[in-house]
Image: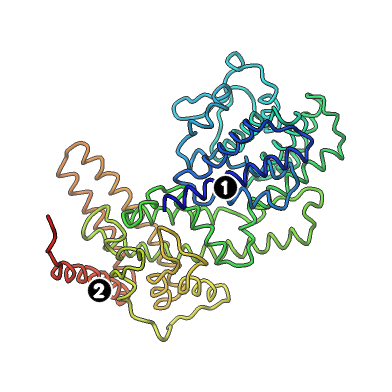
Amino acid sequence: MELERHQGLEQDQERCLERLNWAIQQLGGKADPVRIARTAELIIQTMTGPWRYFHTPEHIFEVGETGDAIEVLAALFHDLVYVQVDQGVSVNISAYISPFIKEINGQLIIRDRLELPSDTMFEMVVQIFGLTVGQALIPTAGQNEFLSALIAAKCLEHSLSPETIAQIVACVEATIPFRERSEAGSSASDRLFGRLLQTSQMFGFNWSEDDIITIVKRSVRLANRDVENFAYPSSADFLNNTWNLLPETNHDLTNTNSYTVNGYRDSLKKMEGFMHFLRPELVFQRFQNEPDEATFRQLIARTGKNLEIARLYLGSKLLSIAVIEALSWRIGRDIPLATMMGELPFRGLTVAQLENFLPTVEVMPHPPETDLEWEVLGLLEKGRSESSSYDIKNSPVATFMIKSIGFNEARRLLVQAKEFFKQADAARKAADEAWKMMDEALLTKEFYNGVRAAEEFLASCDRTVIETITHAVLQVFESRKAAMRGLNLRSTV
């Protein structure tokens, strides 16, 4: 396994180096072999961090694959910094940004003017992003893209002209996702166009308005490729990418078979909330007929459908994990999901899993009422396009519940499930505080507050469904008891 990983790393670095050299040559630049090799290593080492599941080397190659040389370079750098995923800025890339950025109480801030060195690349990147010295960076509003663009500019300043680098930076800026129109009605692309006009004047690029329109159109093309998975024709493929995003923001999921029921539920809850917040028109950008109207409408329509499917799919899974979490409170506060549902299949080994003890629902009393509901049921039953390292691709408990009670009842129960989550989280937090204070009486009280919330939620659900799932959990436990009784203890202890 380690050999395969090392070989994959080398192949990615070679591919990155080839892309860097090709693009610089296309742009009339001159690549210093040593510096460019170091840059390729920097990019791939960072993009293969332990928590990178979606924002990987393959992603940056795909984003730049059909673009011109400027788009290729922007794609290689655009996700280099991802503070939330990497839990900070790695030592390897911090050297490029520390002269310009400082950290105060965990927040990254652009240094004050007196602290900053005189640096054309920095001034240009700040201008294109519309930032100011001394400004605090916001993780969800361009922080990662700004820092990635700054590193790109510093890595490429020895190979390309400032005018060319400015166009690369503009492409990276355009990848800041999900931005609303301003109060005056201007889009993110409109605002970028305005800042590029100022950039041209400040740095003497002498761009015409047509030149800047071309630059912004290119930036929109790259930005739309960055999020093209939202408009995948296959909802299963879209959900598969969604599942790759989950462990990037919940690192506990990388600990296969040891993450808790609550940890898994929290990941689903955050993603379900995000899907409800997101509107299709915030995903893709359009600037002066790039893309053309028909293509843009198709992107928006596909995105809208995928979001609807994701909301119902995630809501169904969230309801099923609510039942498992409520049952888990009967034995403790932070129970591993594998304890309740069985370990994930590992290298072909047969293990006891909850799904093996659930009955098949032959006749659905409340079948799906729309094509979308039928599609979601198929995704729950048959699965996403791929399994992940931390989860199976199908959803047996959710499938059993939906077939038993129908989507309408599931929607009603999901509201109560979310109320249970609030009460359970409050009880868990209070119990943690009681533990710190060594207050045994308060600890016990808060634990039973969680148990009470769990039982109230279970009582609101269909009794037969809960009894069936409870029986299946007990069968998982019984299979472990049977395995323990049959252990051959002829070991050299």
- Picture quarter containing residue 479? bottom left
**Disc 1 vs disc 2: Cβ atoms closer than 8 Å?**
no
Q: Position of residue 297 (x, y in %)?
A: 73, 61
Above or below, 318 against 359 in this view is above
- Where does the C terminus fall, quadrant-wise? bottom left
- 404 and 441: which is toward the camera: 404
Residue in the image at 44% along x and 76% along y: 406
Q: Residue 477, located in which quarter of the rendered image? A: bottom left
The answer to whether residue 424 shows anywhere in this view is yes
Q: Residues within 10 Å of mark 1 (few under 14, many from 20)?
A: many
Residue 169, percent from left and from top = 69, 36
Where 226 sits versus 342, above or below? above
Query: Rounded to the nearest whole Å, what is the CA distance between mark 1 and mark 2?
Result: 48 Å
Labels in figure, total: 2
User: Which residue is found at the position 45% from the left and 80% from the top?
Assistant: 366
Counting from the top left corner in percent of width and height, residue 263 is at 36, 52
Residue of label 1: 12
Q: Which mark is residue 471?
A: 2
Under mark 2, the amino acid is His
428 left or right of 195?
Answer: left
Residue type at mark 1: give it.
Asp
Q: Nearer the viewer, residue 7 or 282?
A: 7
* Residue 421 higher or lower than 205, as above or below: below
Observer-nearest residue: 475 or 149? 149
Image depth: mark 1 or mark 2 in front: 1
Q: Nearer the viewer, residue 363 or 254?
A: 254
Specify which label sits upstream in the sequence, 1 or 2. Answer: 1
Is residue 186 shown to the viewer in this render? no
Q: Secondary structure at mark 2?
A: helix
